[in-house]
Amino acid sequence: MAALSKNANQSRRLLSLAAVLDGMSRTEAAPTGGIDRQTLRAELA
């Protein structure tokens, strides 16, 4: 989905979400998508 998105911000959020679902911690996954841990936490809620 991230590769198909035309929106760069959405792609980064999706990459972070995928990293968490693959077992990475939120603290590690957030920088992967260029967002902070709290934003990622809100996305997962």
Image (spheres, rainbow, N blue to C red):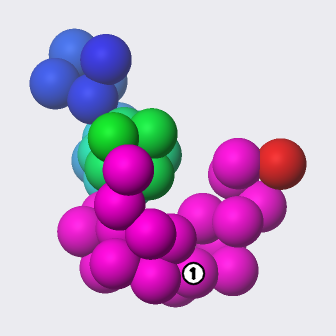
Magenta stretch: residue 24 in it?
Answer: yes
Q: Give neighbour class at mark 1: few <14, some 14-19, many 20+ (Cα, 10 Å).
A: some
Q: Is residue 6 visible?
A: no
Residue at 44% over, 69% down: 25
Amino acid carrying mark 1 in the image: Arg
Q: Which residue is mark 1?
A: 37
Magenta stretch: residue 36 in it?
Answer: yes
State left or right for residue 22 relative to residue 10: left
Q: What type of secondary structure mainly makes up the magenta span? A: helix
In the displayed structure, 31 sits above or below 45; it is: below
Check the image and name the residue furthest to the right.
45
> Magenta segment, which residues?
23-44
Residue at 27% over, 29% down: 2
Find numbered disc 1 in the image and state the secondary structure of the residue it sits on.
Answer: helix
Q: Is residue 44 visible?
A: yes
**x, y (%) of residue 14?**
40, 40
In the displayed structure, 27 sits above or below 33; it is: below
Q: Quadrant of residue 3?
A: top left
**x, y (%) of residue 21?**
45, 39
Residue at 60% over, 65% down: 40
In the displayed structure, 40 sits above or below 23; it is: below
**x, y (%) of residue 7?**
35, 38
